[in-house]
Image: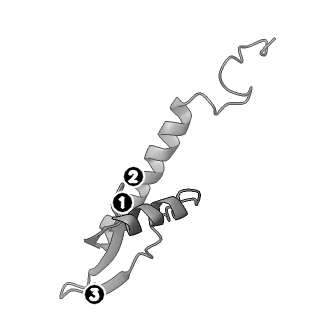
Amino acid sequence: MLLAIALAAATAGTDPAPVQPNTVAPAVVTATSKDGDKTICRNEPITGSRFVKHVCLKKYQWDQRDRDTEQLEHGMQDRSGMVGARGGIGAGPAGPF
């Protein structure tokens, strides 16, 4: 008991170790099926977790997923009001002032 109290008192002034982001490199595995389609498997990080999820899709499915993600990102930027010739939010036809 005294050892625990002494240890707690000794480490009370130290900073905790910083939390490291999920730095797992996505593993890519490629296989070719009988019909000639390539299947690509990747390890994708799970948001809010240190675990990864193994996802296998055909090459055309990965390409479609990448296009969908890019389109979603552009749509979010356009809706934010921060993209525009006059500086975005608050900039009317005559300028901000």
Q: CA distance from mark 3 to mark 1?
A: 19 Å
Amino acid tagged 1: Gln
Identify which residue, 6 or 47, lies in the foreground. 6
Residue contact at pointers 3 and 2, CB within 8 angstroms: no
Q: What is the residue that sits farthest to the front in this orientation?
A: 2
Percent x, y of residue 56: 25, 73
Per the image, label 1 sits on a secondary structure element best described as helix
Q: Which mark is residue 8?
A: none
Residue beneath disc 3: 31
Q: CA distance from mark 3 to mark 2?
A: 24 Å
Per the image, label 2 sits on a secondary structure element best described as helix
Residue beneath disc 1: 64
Per the image, label 3 sits on a secondary structure element best described as strand
Give the number of the mark in front: 3 or 1. Answer: 3
Left or right? Give the position of 16 relative to 92.
left
Amino acid tagged 3: Ala
Residue beneath disc 2: 68
Residue contact at pointers 1 and 2, CB within 8 angstroms: yes
Q: Earlier in the sequence, mark 3 or mark 1?
A: 3
Asked if one can make out residue 18 in the rendered structure from this viewpoint, the answer is no
Q: CA distance from mark 1 to mark 2?
A: 6 Å
